[in-house]
Image (tube, rainbow, N blue to C red):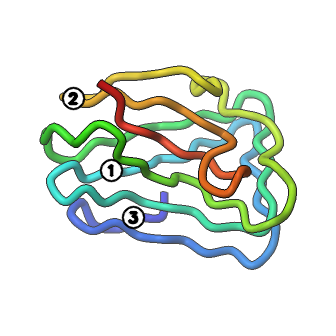
Amino acid sequence: MPSIDANRATTLTIQSALTFESDGTYAYKLNTKRARADQVIANGVSIESGAQFSFVPVANKRLSAGTVFTAISDTSANPISGTFANLADGSTFTAGRNTYEVDYEGGDGNDLSLTVVP
């Protein structure tokens, strides 16, 4: 988890490739009061089967539909390899007062984005 403070989103930038191993968890914090979230930027991303995504909402404010958060920005030309075991591409989940749609091809085509949906 890149964030070290409950109220401040943090970006972790890795100059090389990043692998989420099968027993790993990405603890992703999103502050709905400030509409800010953690982000990982890496030059290539692989997610092994079994890796988990832990969504940690802070505050409970309703966000505007269409608001997009980039959880993982893959700066390589290749798409993200794999998906988190509990976060299927195209799925939706609700946390607090918001529902999010998952897209592993978001942003520039190879990012993990979460979009607020009605």
Which of the numbered marks, if any, corresponds to residue 30? Answer: 1
Q: Are marks 3 and 1 in contact (CB under 8 Å)?
A: no
Q: From what the image shows, is residue 21 above or below residue 99?
A: below
* Crowd rating for badge 2 (residues with CA inside 10 Å; few <14, some 14–19, many 20+): few
**Element at label 3:** loop
Q: Are marks 2 and 3 in contact (CB under 8 Å)?
A: no
Q: Point out the tag, 2 or 3, that comes first from the N-terminus.
A: 3
**Element at label 1:** strand
Q: Residue at x 21, y 29 (%)?
A: 96
Q: Residue beneath label 3, please?
A: 3
Which of the numbered marks, if any, corresponds to residue 96? Answer: 2
Q: Point out the tag, 2 or 1, that comes first from the N-terminus.
A: 1
Q: Is residue 92 left or right of residue 82?
A: left
Q: Amino acid at mark 1?
A: Leu
Q: Position of residue 31 (x, y in %)?
A: 25, 53
* Crowd rating for badge 3 (residues with CA inside 10 Å; few <14, some 14–19, many 20+): some
Q: Point out the tag, 3 or 1, that comes first from the N-terminus.
A: 3
In this orientation, which residue lies closer to the viewer: 116 or 48? 116
Numbered disc in front, either 3 or 1: 1
